[in-house]
Image (cartoon, rainbow, N blue to C red):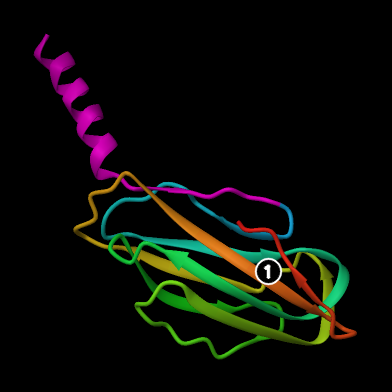
Amino acid sequence: MKKNKLRILFIFLSMFFIPKMVLAVEEGNTLVGSDLTSPGSEITFEVKPSSNSTFKKYEADLSYETNVLELIRIENKNSWTGTNSITSKSPLSLKFEHESGISGEPTVATLTFKVKPDATKTETRISLVGKIEEMDGTLKNLEIS
Protein backbone atom coordinates (compact mmCIF):
# COMPACT_ATOMS: atom_id res chain seq x y z
CA MET A 1 0.00 0.00 0.00
CA LYS A 2 2.83 2.40 0.89
CA LYS A 3 4.57 1.67 -2.43
CA ASN A 4 1.45 2.65 -4.38
CA LYS A 5 1.16 5.91 -2.43
CA LEU A 6 4.83 6.66 -3.14
CA ARG A 7 4.35 5.96 -6.85
CA ILE A 8 1.34 8.26 -7.02
CA LEU A 9 3.24 10.97 -5.14
CA PHE A 10 6.23 10.60 -7.51
CA ILE A 11 3.99 10.87 -10.61
CA PHE A 12 2.21 13.90 -9.15
CA LEU A 13 5.49 15.68 -8.31
CA SER A 14 6.97 14.81 -11.73
CA MET A 15 4.13 16.64 -13.43
CA PHE A 16 5.21 19.87 -11.72
CA PHE A 17 9.00 19.64 -11.85
CA ILE A 18 9.70 18.42 -15.38
CA PRO A 19 9.20 21.25 -17.90
CA LYS A 20 7.90 20.31 -21.34
CA MET A 21 8.30 22.17 -24.61
CA VAL A 22 5.09 22.53 -26.59
CA LEU A 23 5.61 23.48 -30.21
CA ALA A 24 2.97 23.85 -32.85
CA VAL A 25 4.57 22.73 -36.10
CA GLU A 26 3.11 24.29 -39.23
CA GLU A 27 4.24 24.33 -42.83
CA GLY A 28 6.60 27.14 -43.69
CA ASN A 29 8.51 27.70 -40.47
CA THR A 30 9.34 24.95 -37.99
CA LEU A 31 11.44 24.07 -34.97
CA VAL A 32 12.26 20.38 -34.75
CA GLY A 33 13.54 18.84 -31.52
CA SER A 34 12.77 17.05 -28.31
CA ASP A 35 9.75 18.05 -26.29
CA LEU A 36 10.74 16.73 -22.86
CA THR A 37 13.57 17.78 -20.58
CA SER A 38 14.32 18.61 -16.96
CA PRO A 39 15.81 21.54 -15.01
CA GLY A 40 19.54 22.00 -15.62
CA SER A 41 19.63 20.02 -18.86
CA GLU A 42 20.09 21.16 -22.46
CA ILE A 43 17.62 20.88 -25.31
CA THR A 44 18.25 21.55 -29.02
CA PHE A 45 16.00 22.53 -31.90
CA GLU A 46 16.64 22.72 -35.65
CA VAL A 47 15.32 25.81 -37.46
CA LYS A 48 13.72 24.68 -40.73
CA PRO A 49 11.93 27.14 -43.00
CA SER A 50 10.31 25.62 -46.07
CA SER A 51 9.48 27.02 -49.50
CA ASN A 52 8.93 25.72 -53.01
CA SER A 53 10.80 28.81 -54.28
CA THR A 54 14.56 29.28 -54.04
CA PHE A 55 15.41 31.66 -51.22
CA LYS A 56 18.69 33.24 -50.09
CA LYS A 57 17.81 34.99 -46.82
CA TYR A 58 15.89 33.90 -43.76
CA GLU A 59 14.98 36.15 -40.83
CA ALA A 60 13.01 35.22 -37.75
CA ASP A 61 11.99 36.55 -34.36
CA LEU A 62 12.54 33.90 -31.70
CA SER A 63 10.42 34.24 -28.55
CA TYR A 64 10.79 32.12 -25.43
CA GLU A 65 10.31 32.42 -21.68
CA THR A 66 13.63 33.73 -20.34
CA ASN A 67 12.71 32.78 -16.78
CA VAL A 68 12.61 29.10 -17.85
CA LEU A 69 15.10 28.88 -20.74
CA GLU A 70 18.52 30.30 -21.53
CA LEU A 71 19.71 30.32 -25.15
CA ILE A 72 23.32 29.15 -25.03
CA ARG A 73 24.27 28.38 -28.65
CA ILE A 74 23.29 29.18 -32.25
CA GLU A 75 25.03 26.95 -34.80
CA ASN A 76 24.67 27.68 -38.53
CA LYS A 77 24.04 24.65 -40.75
CA ASN A 78 24.26 23.68 -44.45
CA SER A 79 26.27 26.67 -45.74
CA TRP A 80 23.99 29.24 -44.06
CA THR A 81 25.85 32.21 -42.60
CA GLY A 82 24.82 34.65 -39.91
CA THR A 83 26.47 36.37 -37.00
CA ASN A 84 23.66 36.17 -34.50
CA SER A 85 24.43 37.36 -30.99
CA ILE A 86 23.01 35.55 -28.01
CA THR A 87 21.30 37.87 -25.56
CA SER A 88 18.90 37.33 -22.69
CA LYS A 89 16.19 39.29 -24.51
CA SER A 90 13.10 37.76 -26.03
CA PRO A 91 12.14 38.12 -28.83
CA LEU A 92 15.56 37.73 -30.38
CA SER A 93 16.04 38.66 -34.06
CA LEU A 94 17.88 36.02 -36.11
CA LYS A 95 19.26 36.62 -39.63
CA PHE A 96 20.77 34.05 -41.99
CA GLU A 97 21.98 34.10 -45.62
CA HIS A 98 22.75 31.39 -48.17
CA GLU A 99 25.07 32.45 -50.99
CA SER A 100 23.63 30.30 -53.77
CA GLY A 101 20.05 30.07 -52.52
CA ILE A 102 18.13 26.94 -51.64
CA SER A 103 14.59 25.56 -51.80
CA GLY A 104 12.72 22.86 -49.94
CA GLU A 105 13.09 22.51 -46.17
CA PRO A 106 16.74 23.13 -45.28
CA THR A 107 18.09 23.14 -41.75
CA VAL A 108 19.31 26.71 -41.28
CA ALA A 109 20.60 26.49 -37.71
CA THR A 110 20.53 24.54 -34.48
CA LEU A 111 19.48 26.39 -31.33
CA THR A 112 20.59 25.02 -27.96
CA PHE A 113 18.80 26.05 -24.80
CA LYS A 114 19.54 25.25 -21.18
CA VAL A 115 16.59 24.76 -18.86
CA LYS A 116 17.26 26.94 -15.85
CA PRO A 117 17.99 24.89 -12.71
CA ASP A 118 15.24 26.67 -10.77
CA ALA A 119 12.59 26.21 -13.48
CA THR A 120 9.33 25.01 -11.95
CA LYS A 121 6.93 25.28 -14.91
CA THR A 122 5.74 22.08 -16.53
CA GLU A 123 5.16 23.69 -19.93
CA THR A 124 6.75 26.53 -21.85
CA ARG A 125 6.44 27.86 -25.37
CA ILE A 126 8.95 28.82 -28.00
CA SER A 127 7.69 30.68 -31.06
CA LEU A 128 9.40 31.47 -34.33
CA VAL A 129 8.00 34.15 -36.65
CA GLY A 130 9.98 34.23 -39.88
CA LYS A 131 10.24 35.44 -43.43
CA ILE A 132 12.37 34.53 -46.41
CA GLU A 133 13.78 36.58 -49.26
CA GLU A 134 13.57 34.84 -52.61
CA MET A 135 16.30 35.14 -55.26
CA ASP A 136 14.40 37.93 -57.05
CA GLY A 137 14.16 39.97 -53.83
CA THR A 138 10.54 39.09 -53.03
CA LEU A 139 9.83 38.86 -49.29
CA LYS A 140 7.53 36.07 -48.12
CA ASN A 141 6.18 35.80 -44.58
CA LEU A 142 6.12 32.32 -43.12
CA GLU A 143 3.52 30.93 -40.75
CA ILE A 144 4.25 31.07 -37.04
CA SER A 145 5.70 27.94 -35.52
66 displayed left or right of 80: left
In the image, the segment drawn in magenta is 1-26
**Horizontal and vertical percent position of residue 90:** 41, 72
Q: Residue at x 63, y 50 (%)?
A: 25
Q: On the rendered structure, is 74 left or right of 36?
A: right
Q: Which residue is mark 1?
A: 107
**Which quadrant: the C terminus?**
bottom right
Q: Is residue 5 magenta?
A: yes
Q: Is residue 10 above or below residue 94?
A: above
Secondary structure that dominates the magenta span: helix
Whether the magenta-drawn stretch holds residue 121 is answered as: no
Residue 44, percent across and down?
48, 63
State whether residue 103 is above or below residue 56. above
10 Å crowding of disc 1: few (<14), some (14-19), many (20+): some
> At 84% from the left edge and 70% from the top edge, which residue is drawn?
103
Quarter of image, res 96: bottom right
Quadrant of the rendered structure where residue 12 is?
top left
**61 shown above or below 56:** above
Q: Amino acid at mark 1?
A: Thr
Q: Secondary structure at mark 1?
A: loop
**Residue at point 29% right, 44% down?**
18
